[in-house]
Amino acid sequence: MRFIFEKDTWQEIYDSIRKNKGRTAITIFGAFWGILLLVGLLGAAKGIENSFNSLFGDFATNSVFISGSKTTMPFKGYQEGKQIDLTTRDVEIIKKEIRGVQFVVPRNATGGQVTYGFKTGNFTIFGDFPLLDEVQKKRLTDGRFINQKDIDENRKVCVISEGIFKELYKKKEDAIGTYLKISGISYQVVGVYRTSRFEGTNNIHIPFSTFKLVYNKGDKFIWMVVTGKKNFDIVQVEADVKLLLKNIHNVHPNDTRAFRGFNLGKEIAKVTGFLKGLQFLTWFVGIATLIAGVFAIGNILLITVKERTKEIGIRRALGATPNKVRQQIILESLFLTLLAGSLGIIAGGLILMFIDYKEWLTNPTVDIPIILIAYTVLVILGTLIGFIPAYMATIVKPIDALREE
Amino acid sequence: MIKIEKLHKSYPIGKESIHVLKGIDLHIKEGEFVSIMGSSGSGKSTLLNIVGLLDIHDEGNYYLNGELIKDLNEKKAAILRNKFLGFVFQSFNLISYKTALENVSLPLYYKGVSRKERNEISMDYLDKVGLKDWASHLPNELSGGQKQRVAIARALVTKPKVVLADEPTGALDSITSNSVMDLLKDINNEGMTVFVITHEEEIASQTKRIVRLKDGVIVSDELTKAPKTPLHV
């Protein structure tokens, strides 16, 4: 095996490849394309996954949104069509009774006219607890989110989204400490945050307790976000919570429409499943193309061996042993796959960099170990496939090879 | 140098078999300049192939440099060819994508000589055949005569015991042919054994010994009277 480390061996192969550029290009194209596709597709799949994750990134993914609606079945003397309103008492019971619940965050919302100076807009006003920050992370660009003191003292403070800031304020203005008039009442701005793509862009958050007083809500609220603890099935949590709520509010156990629920965990699981499928497809297509590419190398080497019968005959007449000839063909194959692999990885990387630069996807990347594995597989297959033309090169006798015109 | 005793060779063609060489006895000593004459089908190419270890004989003995050639496998043959023999072919057989220098140094590569040394030796031999200035040219940039000179330099570069030339002037015009023959003569004068195969009387007469082959047997084996001086132009 010493020949592998000899400069001369590689020099001879390099010469033979360099001086047949067209042939080399055609030979490596298949494998180059294969690895390019593998890298490109894996990166793109990762990018899609990242984009998706960043979409939901600030949300607790194992969460369910539950709101009250109208009953559709009579129960315990109540007619159907009874309006169900969630109350803060429900929250306490859920926290106490249901296993696997991590947070229960009640929320209120209403539309309202907001004025700052001479500017006015209609935005959504939320009544929120500081806990919201736990289940839907608010990326604050300035100031803070609502805190417990705001709740306890029913402070008239608000946190606004960047969208609202852009509509009402001048570009470099400091919003913190200014006052917004919401439905006729002044609130001091204490925070500005950047919305994730999943939520609306024009949101104002005020303390839950303040909302309750201003809009006369009593203990009622519109919906709540329930998050499950790790390792608890969010679908089961949703079912448990709903059953408990039906019990509390005297709703028929089979009434499926009295409470509405949007199970984020379930929806995300679906998309995650889709992404898994996408990744599998990517691997499948990439590897299949790679193998086809390697076969293309073997195939074209086989053709070139036929074409080079004469050259091989001359080499043998001049003293090349069959081993030397085989070595050369196999090493050429190896060299070509190395070249194809390297170029493919570089080109794939450039494509991913371009996608990243254009921000079509979020961080389209491929893990280095995966690249190394693909590269190694490619090189091993390339070497193995080289044995076929190498064998073909030596079954022709030198005398017959020389006679060939 | 080359000793052949009762050499037989036949080729199977379908179910039949053609008896090409029918008991050849030939002894070529070191430093001889021998030509094998014969029309096509006389078996001269087969003889050269056997002498050149490109083919194996059926019967008889063949000694190369005193060594009995038998049980030859491809590897052994390749090593012996590299060590003892230099080939000059009718169609030059240069590798088209290699320069003159690289073509000349190829046998040294297979001999395991280092690149630097290889290039030095090869350049010397190119100089010897008068093509030093053409070292970096590709074969298709050379004339027929120049190509054959490169081929001769390549045959000599490993310092073989015998140079085997198969119709070395077959693809050349008469003037170029003469200059190639002059070169072979020069090599012979330096002590190299040269073994030429030809069907041209003109070429054979420039060697020192002519062996005539007909239908697989040697019909005559004589020394040329005086080395005939070719018509220099």
Image: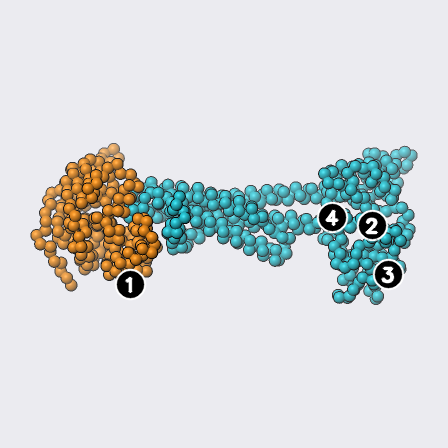
Chain colours: A cyan, B orange
Do tag 1 and tag 2 residues touch (Cβ < 8 Å)?
A: no
In front of the other: B80 or A209 = B80
Residue density around tag 2, few if under 14, some if 14–19, many if 20 or more, within 10 Å: many
Task: Identify the amino acid type marked 3.
Answer: Lys
Which dot, 3 or 2, sits closer to the camera? Answer: 2
Vertical placement of A165 versus B62: above or below?
below
Query: In the rendered image, which quarter contains the N terminus of chain B?
Result: top left
Check the picture and name the quadrant holding the C terminus of chain B: bottom left
Q: Amino acid at mark 4?
A: Phe
Quarter-of-image position of residue B175: bottom left
Whole-percent x and y of residue A151? 86, 51
Which residue does the numbered mark 1 point to in the structure image? B133
Extreme residue in the left direction: B225
Res A111 → quadrant: bottom right
Q: What SS does tag 2 mark?
A: loop
Mark 3–mark 4 Cα distance, whole angstroms, equals 29 Å
**Element type where label 1 sits in the image:** helix
Q: Quadrant of residue A185?
A: bottom right
Question: What chain does badge 3 belong to?
Answer: A
Q: Which of the two residues, A230 or A66, is positioned nearer the viewer here?
A: A230
Q: Residue at x 21, y 50 (%)?
A: B163
Q: Which residue is mark 2?
A: A129
The reply to whether label 1 and label 2 mark residues of one chain is no
Asked if B67 appears above or below B32 in the picture, the reply is: above
Amino acid at dot 2: Phe
